[in-house]
């Protein structure tokens, strides 16, 4: 049986991340953020049961933004850490620490995994590499006629 207090906190956390994504990001980030909240809620010891929900929300947004280059102005959508901290009323150090905890918890990395955006997956520089007998070569190398 699901704990009603956990369900209430999860719903509040979902509303926080949805609100931020609607204001600053896009629908794909909203889906990824909600997916992360759901995944956190399925853990044996639900992490967001302790601590402020605003800190968890800012950490979730920061973690997903980090692995998808959302803090790089050459990527769209772009946000700054200050946008996150101002919106949730959190300190930058607290937000980045919570983000690191979340990224470690889910083994998040750049260009892949379940929390990567489609554009991040497409721009992965490793997409066009293959391994042949232990050697990594560009896939187009195999297509060239020698």
Image (cartoon, rainbow, N blue to C red):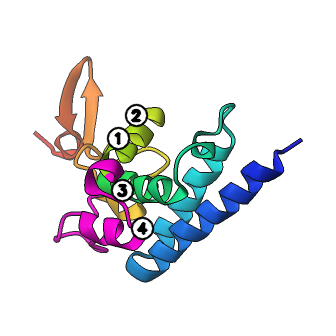
Q: What is the residue that sits farthest to the right in this orientation?
A: 1
First-in-chain label (3 vs 4): 3
Q: Is residue 118 visible?
A: yes
Residue at x-position 26% and y-position 59%: 69
Residue at x-position 58% and y-position 40%: 47
Are the two marked residues, 2 and 4, in contact with CB atoms closer than 8 angstroms? no
Query: Alpha-carbon distance for marks 2 and 4?
Result: 22 Å
For label 4, count other residues whose C-alpha is less than 10 Å away and answer few (under 14), some (14-19) or many (20+): some
Question: Which segment is the magenta one?
Answer: 69-95
Residue nearest the observer in this picture, 19 or 30? 19
First-in-chain label (2 vs 4): 4
Q: Which residue is mark 3?
A: 62
Give the structural element (helix, strand or loop) at label 4.
Answer: helix
First-in-chain label (3 vs 1): 3
Query: Alpha-carbon distance for marks 3 and 1?
Result: 9 Å
Q: Which residue is mark 2?
A: 104
Q: Nearer the viewer, mark 2 or mark 4?
A: 4
First-in-chain label (1 vs 4): 4
Q: Which residue is mark 1?
A: 100
Query: Alpha-carbon distance for marks 1 and 4?
Result: 17 Å
Residue 88 is marked as 4
Q: Is residue 17 magenta?
A: no
Q: Is residue 124 left or right of residue 12?
A: left
Query: Alpha-carbon distance for marks 2 and 3?
Result: 13 Å
Are the two marked residues, 1 and 2, in contact with CB atoms closer than 8 angstroms? yes
Query: Alpha-carbon distance for marks 1 and 2?
Result: 6 Å
Q: Is residue 73 left or right of residue 29?
A: left
- Residue 27, position in %: x, y? 50, 74
Residue at x-position 31% and y-position 57%: 91
């Amino acid at each position: 049986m699901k704990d009603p207090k956990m369900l209430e906190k999860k719903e509040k956390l979902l509303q926080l991340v949805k609100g931020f994504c609607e204001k600053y990001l896009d629908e794909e980030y909203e889906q990824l953020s909600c997916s992360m909240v759901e995944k956190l809620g399925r853990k044996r010891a639900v992490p967001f049961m302790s601590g402020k929900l605003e800190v968890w929300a800012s950490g979730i947004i920061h973690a997903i933004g980090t692995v998808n280059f959302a803090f790089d102005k050459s990527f769209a959508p772009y946000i700054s850490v200050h946008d996150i901290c101002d919106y949730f009323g959190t300190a930058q150090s607290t937000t980045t620490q919570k983000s690191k905890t979340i990224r470690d918890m889910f083994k998040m990395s750049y260009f892949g995994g379940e929390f990567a955006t489609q554009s991040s997956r497409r721009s992965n520089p490793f997409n066009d590499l293959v391994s042949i007998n232990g050697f990594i070569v560009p896939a187009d190398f195999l297509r060239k006629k020698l």
